[in-house]
Image (spheres, rainbow, N blue to C red):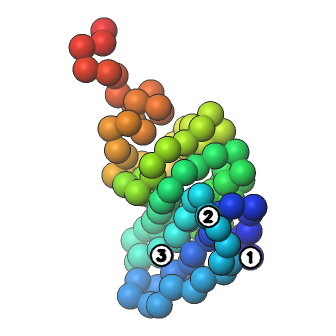
Amino acid sequence: MLEGPSCVVLATLVVGAAPTLLRVAPMDCWIGVTRHADRTVVSLAGRLGAAQAPELLAACLQAGRPLQLDLSELVSLDAAGVEAILRLRAHGVTLVGVPGYIQLKLGLARWPGAE
């Protein structure tokens, strides 16, 4: 079981199957794992910080390949969250649904008008 001080890990083993809640607690970050026939998707929602980064890395390590990291519901991240996501990306994880603000934090985009 993946647990952290302020994180809920929700695992869906088969597309269309009911999710299984592993822990209920006040949360800053939600991590969901969905296995498709051709890929695994790890989804994040909320705020990713130092307290949740180890759970994210563990979920991705256990998820299998090919792996997509869906950041469409990620609201914010601190330096530890940036480091974790960039580390995953460097190891071949595909980032999808990355909001503009998060792209800027990750260094994947530039501010409009910046050189």
* Number of numbered discs: 3
Give how far apart the Cα atoms at labels 2 and 3 are.
23 Å
From the top left corner, tell me how far across and down residue 45 is, in percent: 48, 59
From the top left corner, tell me how far across and down residue 34 is, in percent: 47, 74
From the top left corner, tell me how far across and down residue 21 is, in percent: 60, 83
Task: Tell me if I can see residue 64 in this picture.
Answer: no
Name of the residue lying farthest toward the bottom: 18
Residue highlighted by disc 3: 35
> Few, some or many C-alpha atoms within 10 Å of disc 2 (few <14, some 14-19, many ≥20)?
some
Of mark 2 and mark 1, the one earlier in the sequence is 1
In the picture shown, does residue 24 fall above or below 28? below
Residue highlighted by disc 1: 1
- 11 or 76: which is nearer to us? 76
Q: In the image, which disc is placed on residue 27?
A: 2
- What amino acid is labelled 2 in the image? Met
Of mark 1 and mark 3, the one earlier in the sequence is 1
Q: Are marks 2 and 1 in contact (CB under 8 Å)?
A: no
Q: Nearer the viewer, mark 1 or mark 3?
A: 1
Residue under the image location 65 percent in, 78 percent down: 24
- What amino acid is labelled 1 in the image? Met
